[in-house]
Amino acid sequence: MQQMSLDENGTKSPAFGHVPFSPEFGSKKPPSYQESQPELSQKLQEALRLHNNTGSDGFTMAELIKESPGLTFDDFLCLPGHIHFSPEDVSTSTRVTRNVRLKCPFVSSPMDTVSETNLAVAMALQGGIGIVHYNCPIEEQAMMVRSVKRYKNGFINDPLTMGTNATVKDIRNIKFERGFSGIPITESGKIGSKLLGMVCTRDIDFVGDDELPVTEVMTRELVVAKEGCTLSQANELMKSSKKGKLPIVNEKGELIALISRTDLLKNRDYPNCSVDKTSKQLLCGAAVGTRESDYERVRALAAEHVDVIIIDSAQGDSTYQAQMIRFIKGNFPHIDVVGGNVVTSLQAAHLIQAGCDGLRCGMGVGSICTTQEVMACGRPQAVSIYQVSRFAKQFDIPVIADGGIRSPGHIMKALTLGASCVMMGSMLAGTHEAPGQWFYRDGIRMKKYRGMGSKEAMEKGSSTRYLMSEQSTIRVEQGVSGAVADKGTLHHFLPHLHMCLRQALQDVGIKSLMELHHGSEAGFVKFEKRTAAAQMEGRVHTVQHVQSTGFGAPS
């Protein structure tokens, strides 16, 4: 087998669209907004001081909450700050849980009309994370997580291998069932055995005999990398050798890992993708309930190396959820757990004490949710995010703002209030990667979108998230079914939302989400209340036949 040398002095140009990381959390360096303010003359400084004594521009967040107790997104605006950088310099890196970081603060909602394999893959490739729903059998959910995790790899430590008794038919079956070829052939047919060759599509394309042994068609002269090489070294070797697969072998020639050229291309095409630090696989989350069967569901998800588990409940402050959190952290401490949903600091305290790594905030504010109307229980979303995140910050627990996001501006407001990420359902439901069939209504292409508290979803099994008995004959609906218009592919839609956020941060004069939280808490970022007339003024008005991309919505 041929060994090829590596050029360790090669340089790489930064990838297009690269998002710089925020300074490390806990950094003592002063925020950039404090250092970049233009220096004013003494006369202007004195004039500003006198002006502020009689009434300053806007409110701090604490003042705004005190002025408007039932605050929600449309009730306020962020005031502009001083711009000293371009949108490309803005960092949106954040944490979705205590230990899991993302380059974009976007999370998909675990709904059966939103988050399945295709959308979870696209979310991770674009720098966010997808949360696979659990309104399905355990095996189906585990298979979806497996598909996401295996979409992109660094070192593949458990590659599919075959032995010398395999035939051409076996290779073709794998190609048909799994969508790939490039199978290592080892002496025992398992990893850890001596590597004999590789069988790729080109080796069997023109072979007519399906019963021919793979030993007669496999490629024996291979380019391999030695055990101990870094992923970047292996990638450089694969690029220079122009091979599709690169086996990693030890000194005895035994196969210990494999890397794929398709993964190298994914790294190039998606520089912001969310990956596990060790395996380089895409990050993936999954939702579970709190029933007895969900303990088995957790075990199945852990076996597929899920990164985050969200305990899905409309009202998360329950003994059942605390027990589930303790079970997961006790048996699978490497998996981060998000508790919720909560809207008060007391609810948050109960779940933090149980051991959660993140909180999901929001109750009855989703576009298809009727909890507040039916149960008279919940809280306006803006004040919920502010109070929960302000409390959780003391314990280093990130908060996900879940629900009420109707436009890019709402994303900015949720993050300004203290959320680390935003969870979206209806915003993502009309994308090509979301599950469901297209249909036309009044000439508009649409997809079905339903709340997990709707009658349709409950009949499929989602009533468990509302702590209902499976034997109950009376089910109280807390959601509706509807449809959303086509938004195009997520690979266009999410970058648009991302750039909207970066430009919004630029307008406020803030270079990162960490600085946004610091500036909002310190009173540097200011806000203004909006009357009903001001909300009308801020929307499109006095214009007919408005043309829009469909990406944004009136704020």
Image (tube, grey):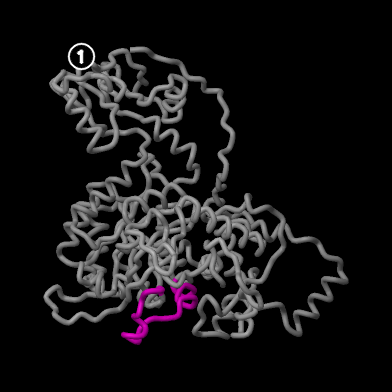
Residue at 31%, 57% in the rendered image: 132
Q: Is residue 416 visible?
A: no
How many other residues sit within 10 Å of disc 1, few (<14), some (14-19) or many (≥20)? few
Image coordinates for residue 164, horizontal then vertical, percent: 16, 19
Question: In the rendered picture of this protein, how many numbered marks are placed on residues?
Answer: 1
In the displayed structure image, the side of residue 165 where residue 554 appears, left or right: right
Residue where numbered disc 1 is placed = 216
In the displayed structure image, the side of residue 47 where residue 261 appears, left or right: left
Q: Would residue 341 be counted in the magenta stretch? A: no
The one nearer the camera, 334 or 496, is 496
Q: Would residue 374 be counted in the magenta stretch? A: yes
Part of the protein shown in magenta: 366-388
Image coordinates for residue 215, horizontal then vertical, percent: 19, 16
Work out whether 368 lies above or below 500.
Answer: below
In the displayed structure image, the side of residue 83 where residue 9 appears, left or right: left
Image coordinates for residue 300, horizontal then vertical, percent: 20, 52
In the displayed structure image, the side of residue 213 where residue 101 appears, left or right: right
The one nearer the camera, 4 or 389, is 4
Image coordinates for residue 213, horizontal then vertical, percent: 16, 18
Q: Is residue 146 visible?
A: yes
The quadrant of the rendering that contains the N terminus is top left
The residue type indicated by label 1 comes to Glu
Splitting the image into 4 quarters, where does residue 204 fall?
top left
The quadrant of the rendering that contains the C terminus is bottom right
Residue at 27%, 57% in the rendered image: 329
Work out whether 11 lies above or below 443.
Answer: above
Callout 1: helix, strand or loop?
helix
